[in-house]
Amino acid sequence: MVMCSLVGGGPRWASGGELVLMRPETFLRQPSSWLRACSEFHSTITASPNFGLELVARRGNAPNMDLRRLRVCLTGGEIVHPETLQAFESCFGDSNLNPLVLCPAYGLAEAAVAVSVVAPEEHWSADAVDQESATTRDRSVRRLERSS
């Protein structure tokens, strides 16, 4: 399932298999519908901007969902907050969500969907950088902290 309206179901998706589409309005009215579709259709791939992960985590886990088949949950399109990823992992652990499925990505929309993405089955990490040094002509950017 790819959250901009698509749900990729099953391992045959890339070779003519199943693809489930979801209207964004459906997600906005009932955010849990996204992960319910992933559970029902045994999705292996999905995607969402940070606000989507935040919204479903804030609403809480819905009972009787099984997300064990999910292998990739690409998140990007806006700033990805580590706190959102942690809340999402925590909220859906009871639904068999593997924390390694979360793949934060940085992209250039005008060029590609994702330029940089964590590899599937690797845990994401985040760096906090000094904004002042990042916006000056100084080529070195000071890392403030790293979380994983």
Image (cartoon, helix red, strand yellow):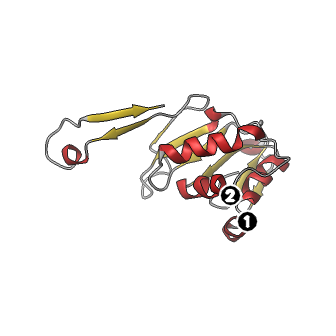
Pick the residue in front: 82 or 1. Answer: 82
Residue at image position (55%, 55%) is 49
Find residue 139 and report its horizontal and vertical position in percent. 17, 38
x and y percentages locating residue 67 in the rendered image: 76, 41
Q: Position of residue 60 (x, y in %)?
A: 70, 53
* 117 relative to 131 in the view: left or right: right
Q: Residue at x 13, y 46 (%)?
A: 137
Q: How many marks?
A: 2
For this rendering, which residue is in front, 148 or 58?
58
Rendered residue at 23%/45% (across/down): 134
Residue in front for this viewpoint, 14 or 36: 36
Compare marks 2 and 1 and give the one earlier in the sequence. Answer: 1
Q: Which residue is mark 2?
A: 59
User: What kind of residue is marked 1?
Assistant: Gln
Q: Please state if 77 lies on the left or on the right of 143 as rendered.
A: right
Vertical placement of residue 140 versus 49, above or below: above
Q: Amino acid at mark 2?
A: Arg
Q: Residue 70's mark?
A: none
Q: What's the mark number on residue 30?
A: 1
Which x, y percent locates residue 23? 71, 67
SS at badge 2: helix
For disc 1, the neighbor class at 10 Å (few under 14, some 14 to 19, many from 20) is: few
| CA gap, disc 2 and disc 1 | 10 Å
